[in-house]
Image (spheres, grey):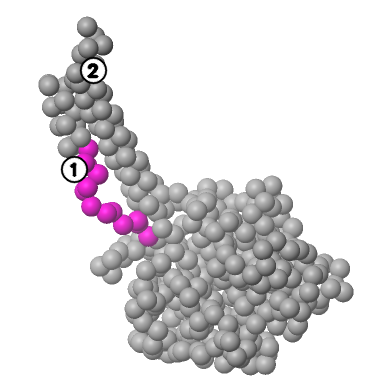
Amino acid sequence: MLSIRLALLLLASAVQFCSGGYVPPTKYLIVSNARNGTIGYVKLSRTGQHSPVRILIDKQLVHPQGIAVDQKRQLLLIADSELKKVVSYGLLVREDGSLGVDEQTPVAEDVEARWVTVDGLGNVYLTDEEQGKVFKISAQQMLDGDTEARPAYAEAGPGDSSGGVAAGGAVSAPGGIATDNFHVFWTNKEQGETVGTVMKALQVPGRASGGGGGSSNASASPQLQSPKALAKNLAKAYGLCLALDSLFFTGPDKRVYAVKTTTPSSGDEGVVTVVASDLENPRGCAWDGESTVFVADRSADGVFAISGPPLSMTEASSTKVVHFEGAFGVAVFSSARKSSAAAASAALWAALLALSSALLASSPSAGARRM
């Protein structure tokens, strides 16, 4: 009986440890400064009293613009148009809660990339405004260290020896880019009112929609999978970010817009909503995974917060939450407290095992066997 009491006491302690309440992940807002080649960050707070800005990277970059976070692999991706590269850094959270990075690793080379995004599988997408192409670095290339970016969608089409599916005029100086694991979205910085301000296309060009199996050959019926315009409200747009089923994008008219990712059944572009109009020179944006969209404003030297889904899709005032000179790209990194969860799980399993052993040892059948 004593062993059972001890096991129950251990179990009660383990349950108390595990039921200490949900501890939300620590989130960090990462910002690029294209003017001086630095990357900074702040630790976000639910009270709005964020930590002071700290410098994360202050060397090896020249003109960092668009940035993205591979949450699963804890990588920071940076598009540097002057280096003509997309590079990555491993992200790490130190014991004191500060953020750090490891060494720089090239992801894509010989591309004048200004914007970059990554999907859940680790495939990296980037845009090259000068070449007029949307490029891809596959997850396998990331593992192999292959830095040759392959065109996914290109203005030139099949006759271009560099590859890529003809975009049917849908790629026109592409800018900001986002992905939802099935589609890739980008903004155009030229002829947006005719070509499309925000475009949507399948990640795998030429694959039949909804087809189970079938060829994934990029040359297979590309006209059936030509990119669709979700918005044609601006001649040019800059940053682009995904928040649930909405795309937020920034324009040269000091505004931030939103449009649904779904393609209208009529074939026309979707309904565009103005969500902020009080900025100066907005560029990159990022969703925090909850209810806030952060927008970098390079002229206002900071990052602004606006209400995002599911709370609001209507125009509201933006609030400056971070002062950072020349803010251009922005991303959110979420660090879960895995060590605490693992310790709680281990404690609970140990307690259950001890209780099971004690019950088996005290059962009548166990006593008969000992006789």
Against 360, residue 114 (above or below) is below
Task: Tell me residue 370's x, y (percent).
Answer: 24, 9
Residue for badge 1: 16
Can the viewer see residue 366? yes
The quarter of the picture where residue 120 lies is: bottom right
Q: Which residue occupies 35% across, 87% down?
A: 316
Q: Secondary structure at mark 1?
A: helix
Q: Which residue occupies 31% across, 57% down?
A: 24
Discs 1/2, front? 2
Q: Which residues are magenta?
A: 14-27
Task: Tell me residue 328's x, y (percent).
Answer: 51, 73
Quarter occupied by the N terminus: top left
Quarter occupied by the C terminus: top left
Horizontally, residue 340 falls left or right of residue 213, namely: left
Q: Nearer the viewer, residue 197 or 280?
A: 197
Residue 199 lies in magenta, yes or no?
Answer: no
Horizontally, residue 154 falls left or right of residue 118, namely: right
Against 349, residue 65 (above or below) is below
Per the model, the C-alpha gap separating discs 1 and 2 is 32 Å
Task: Tell me residue 282's x, y (percent).
Answer: 49, 81
Task: Tell me residue 351's x, y (percent).
Answer: 25, 32
